[in-house]
Image: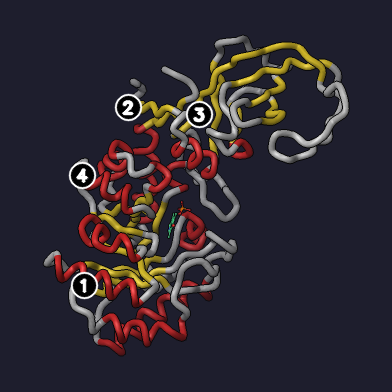
Amino acid sequence: MDTPYLEIDLAKLFSNTQELVKMFGARNIDITGITKVALGEPRVANCLVSAGLTSLGDSRIANIKRMRQAGVKATFVLIRTPSMTEVNDVVKYADVSFNTEVSIISELSKAAIKQNKVHDIVLMVELGDLREGILQKNLDATIDQIVKLKGVNLKGLGANLACFSGVKPSKKNMDQLSLLAETYEKKYQIKFDIISGGNSANFDWFFANEDLGRINDVRLGESIFIGRETLTREHIEGLHLDAITLVAEVIESKTKPSFPEGEVGQDAFGNTTIFVDKGDMLRTILSVGKQDVHVPGLTPFIDVDIIGSSSDHLILDATRSPLQVGDDVRFSLDYAALLSCMTSPFVAKSYVENGIT
Ligand SMILES: *Cc1c(COP(=O)(O)O)cnc(C)c1O
């Protein structure tokens, strides 16, 4: 296997998904599995479906198209509000899309009529995190316009917290979402099928609250792939933290000083580093760098320190765990590191099923 590579353990992903389906199922909450971090890779998507998910969401229509064309059997949800230029593909490949703009929904309506389809819409409501969402005071006017459009069906409401500003899901903002659902169902004589409460950051809220109101769906990415909730990055008991790991290879390993020689200016990325003289150390270089991975998100499996990185090199202090040229070093990844590796053309992807590559 060429290095660096991501090792994607489908048995562990299956187990994480199944555990979450059990936990949320006990609270009558459906999970929409969010595949964006896996670029809609069909093997990953099929793994989530075989573990019990019936709904898959992705932020990119290209990923949804990839899964659909590969024959993945699920309801596909576009979780990023569509752009004007992709409405035809959205209607063609996605069953549901999250929306906040009447002008876009009106184009979706036209595209759906042309394609002889009815496209489902979930309206995203702004609950304070200030990424996507319709202001609550404008929701009534928005619904009023949408219910008049043909080709689109208002399937539900959703909200997204903790993604941009880090605003936490709370009893107050979640109750507010339920209240909005009930208010407008009554006013417009409609029934919302989906009230999508949030993402992996809602984990604690779902299990700490008795009454979940009208919330019946959660969109999970990080907890499936990384095994953590996302408010404090706490490990979710029973889930694997190492379903996906990065393997990189040693290309140099030498005992060298810890303190640079000569006058120090800015490095290749415009940073000025303060060095501490710790005497000699075993400095080991791996053939992976900032072009491949968000380095702060890496945690080595062995007892070494990451000293730093440049575009193509990762430098370790391997004094406590000596490494030789050609050795592999394995890392666990946070979400940012996983996203960067997945999107790097230089990082190969290796799938492990039942322990066999
Ligand atoms: C990425 C994303 C999610 C999934 O978030 P996780 O923290 O990975 O669970 C859910 N909803 C929306 C709108 C997203 O963009």
Q: Amino acid at mark 4?
A: Gln
Q: Nearer the viewer, residue 231 or 85?
A: 85
Label placed on residue 233: none
Which element carries disc 2, helix, strand or loop?
A: loop
Residue 165: horizontal and vertical position, in percent? 59, 63
Residue at (46% x, 65% y) in the render: 160
Residue 30 in the image: state x and y as whole percent: 32, 58
Q: Callout 1: few (<14), some (14-19), or many (20+) C-alpha neighbours within 10 Å?
A: some
The amino acid pointed to by label 1 is Lys
Q: Mark 2 is on which residue type?
A: Glu
Q: Dot 3, crowdedness within 10 Å: few (<14), some or many (≥20)?
A: many
Q: In terms of sequence position, does the residue under pointer 4 or pointer 1 come before the other?
A: 4
Residue 206 vs 172, above or below: the answer is: above
Q: Which label lies toward us, 3 or 4?
A: 4
Placement of 249 over or under 49, stated as above or below = above
Q: Give the alpha-carbon distance from disc 3 to disc 2, as whole Å.
A: 17 Å
Estimate how packed mark 2 is, as few (under 14), some (14 to 19) or many (20 or more) residues with alpha carbons within 10 Å: few
Q: Quadrant of residue 138?
A: bottom left
Q: Which residue is mark 3?
A: 246
Q: Which residue is mark 4?
A: 69
Quote the CA–CA distance across marks 4 and 2.
23 Å
Query: Which numbered disc flags the more N-terminal residue, 2 or 1?
Result: 1
Give residue 174's position: percent from left, percent from top. 47, 72
Residue indicated by mark 2? 353
Would you say 76 lies left or right of 332 here? left
Q: Quadrant of the N terminus?
A: top left
- The picture quadrant where one finds residue 49 is top left
Q: Amino acid at mark 3?
A: Leu
Q: Which of the two discs, 4 and 1, sits closer to the camera?
A: 1
Across the whole image, how many numbered discs are drawn on residues?
A: 4
Q: Position of residue 18 (x, y in %)?
A: 34, 44
Residue matched to label 1: 110
